[in-house]
Image: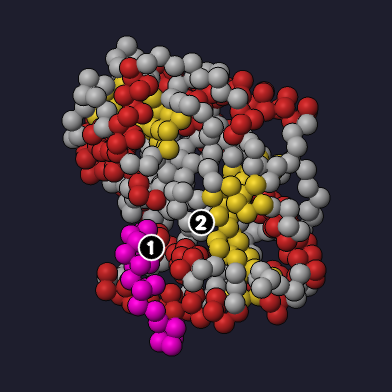
Amino acid sequence: MSNKYLIDFGLIPLDVINLVINEHENVDFIVEDKFKYQRGVKYGLNTSRFFLTPCLNAKGDYRFYDYNIVQNILMDYKTLQLFDRTESVFHTISSKIRKISSKIEAAIKLIKSNNYTDLIFTATPHNCNNWILAKVAEYLGCKVHYFKQSVIPWRYSLYTGLSMNAKINHVFEEIDNDEVTEINDFLDKKRGGLEEALPDYEKKRILNNKGKLYSIRREINYINRPDLLFNKLFCWIKYNKLSVSPELSDKYIVFFLHFQPERTTLPEGYGFTQQVLAIKALRKNTPKDIKLYVKEHPSTFTNHCHWKEKDTSFYEEIANIEGVYLVDINFDQYKMIDKSIAVGSITGTVLFESIVRNVPSIAFGLSPYIQSEIHHKFKDEISLKNFINRIYENSHSDCFYVMDSLTNTFSVKKHSFIALQPGTNDNHIAAAIGIMKILDNKFSFSVNK
């Protein structure tokens, strides 16, 4: 049986969608909302193979109710977390269960009625509707694919499966001498100090904030959301009250928190979407004579601090864990990395940055693939404890070679797409390139990593 694909319309360039529709009869598109649907109409796309997300305001259809699928998806707490993130707050647990069940029925109906074998998303599904559609697909034996950025920001990989053990599919686009030079320049920046190594997006935010991470005057932007305004204020006060300046001469591991809500923790954190759980796992399996420092992400205060994810009790709970200390938000993170025994995070770029600086790292979620003897991806508490003991008791000098982490990647640097949608970014360009490679059978499914 030939494959039949359902592809997330997302923000993929419209000329790519048009090409796919005209050249591949075995492809349909799932469109998230009516605005994107109308954008396709205006561009002149053949919309007969478009489906509005079936889970959106789904009424349900009892003929497609499946007890096992409903129970399994409901028992995955990430489903409820995503519902809370993207749906109205005015729901009880009981009404959430009812609405999610209806979404599941609608997704089953779409997939079974059209005999799809593969779903392709531009990124890890991270809104409630796409998550449910993808989970239903997997339970029905349909493969779920998506694209993720590698350790080099302009190179991407195709992943299959919604789990910490997702597979990376084999494709490799040659790296020429010019790109090698560019990669080496990028690595040199990551080995530098705060000014060189800090991501550009964070530099821009701090610059826009006139060098301050938090300013009451700037918070006037949230006047229409007083709940967010006051939550950030209270969190800022609480964090600064509880935080300390780290002693770099101490033996310590540093854990870097993520800004939330964000795809990189929900769902890509999987069992650790609630970051306190990762901190507890790390503290429990680290020798007591090693401190655990925890540093908040600057974007929590330069962007918004949502009470759905963090409030003052979040910081209180971290500070109350024995041997765990919140770190002054203004302290240089790269100085902390360089003097640490190891760096922990859910999926953050800091995991790669520490390896580049010859400091071990521990990932608690589905982070970009890193091939290194001093990088650990969480599997269970025993292996975590063994890794920490190994790096603590033995000196290490990892001969990190970045190309080993790029063996299943392709670049988004060179493309000729012209009909970009508003908001199209590198992830959508990667999806466009990758989708054409999939349809032209240029991917080898799949390689375990």
Q: Which residue is mark 2?
A: 161
Magenta range: 58-81
Task: Tell me which corner region of the image, top left, top right, bottom left or bottom right, holds residue 195.
Answer: top right
Position of residue 215 measured from the top left corner of the image (x, y, whole percent): 40, 36
Q: Residue at x 60, y 73 (%)?
A: 116
**Residue lying furthest front:** 1
Label 2 Cα crowd, 10 Å radius (few <14 / some 14-19 / many 20+): some
Q: Nearer the viewer, residue 246 or 159?
A: 159
Label 1 Cα crowd, 10 Å radius (few <14 / some 14-19 / many 20+): many
Provide the secondary structure element on which disc 2 rests.
Answer: loop
Position of residue 257 measured from the top left corner of the image (x, y, whole percent): 38, 37
Amino acid marked by disc 1? Thr
138 left or right of 283? right
Q: Is residue 310 magenta?
A: no
Q: Which residue is mark 1?
A: 79
Q: Residue at x 58, y 47 (%)?
A: 447
The reply to whether residue 329 is in sight is: no
Amino acid marked by disc 2? Gly
Q: Main secondary structure of the magenta part?
A: helix
Task: Tell me which corner region of the image, top left, top right, bottom left or bottom right, holds residue 408.
Answer: top right
Q: Where is the N terminus found, in terms of image quarters?
A: bottom right
Q: Residue at x 54, y 79 (%)?
A: 112
Position of residue 159 measured from the top left corner of the image (x, y, whole percent): 57, 51
Position of residue 127 measured from the top left corner of the image (x, y, whole percent): 47, 61
Provide the secondary structure element on which disc 1 rests.
Answer: helix
